[in-house]
Amino acid sequence: MAIQLGSIVDPSQDIFASTGAHGDFRVIPQFGPNKGKAINPRFARSLLTRISAGGTPLTQKNKDGQYSFNFPVTSEFGPRQAPTEGASTYHRGIDLGIGAGTPLTYTGEGGTYTPGKGMGTLSITDDQGQPYDIQLLHTVPGTASEAVATPQASSDKNNVLNVYFGKGSQHQDKKDKSKSLLQAFKEKIMLNAVNQALNPLAGLQNNFDPFEAIS
């Protein structure tokens, strides 16, 4: 699902100090020792593959497994000499040279976008489920949006049995799940007993293990 993140602002209308059209992308973990602190976006380039400018992802994975930027880096993260009056001497993001008016889009599972003044914040999780905020400065903000994540299939053994034996939904409480597991066991025992009655040699031939069905 896609979220529109606004577009790169015309420098003449930018509320932040700017030397030209570009986007300033800041990555802020919302967990661990760096919670709430901007980190070098070069350490989170896989997240930036989900954001595109004019249809081109900000970063891309190469054949050698490394990530590279698809736009020129005009200012790195960290200490710097202020590029213009009013600009910071410690850059909390990475600047990419992207033309004014270029639309920015997020594509991925889940995510929330919150617009601000001259910027917006995209809240997403990485492949391990860890939360991040990505700030997009020097932009004309989009509208508040949310991409709903697709529910993941449960790996719970009881839920699998419930579906297989038609014993209810994946949202049963623990008590119901325990009943379903016991019922599945009973049904398997009963089925084997019927098969043995019809074919007395079946049990000897199959070496039936009643727990195999629920392992």
Image: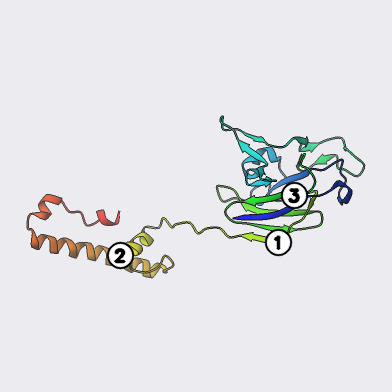
SS of the residue under disc 2 = helix
Spatial CA span between label 2 and label 1: 43 Å
- Camera-nearest residue between 164 and 180: 164
Mark 3 residue type = Leu
Tell me: 111 left or right of 141: left
Q: Return the residue at label 3.
A: 136
Seen as rendered, the residue at the extreme left is 200
SS of the residue under disc 1 = loop
Q: Return the residue at label 2.
A: 165
Residue lying at 10% horizontally and 52% vertically, measured from the top left: 204
The label number, if any, that marks residue 144 in the structure image: 1
Judged by depth in the image, the label closer to the viewer, 2 or 1, is: 1
Seen as rendered, the residue at the extreme top is 64
- Camera-nearest residue between 92 and 31: 92
Q: Residues within 10 Å of mark 1 (few under 14, many from 20)?
A: some
Tell me: 202 left or right of 2: left
Mark 1 residue type = Ala
Say whether disc 2 or disc 3 marks the residue closer to the N-terminus.
3
Mark 2 residue type = Phe
Residue 184: x and y, percent? 27, 64
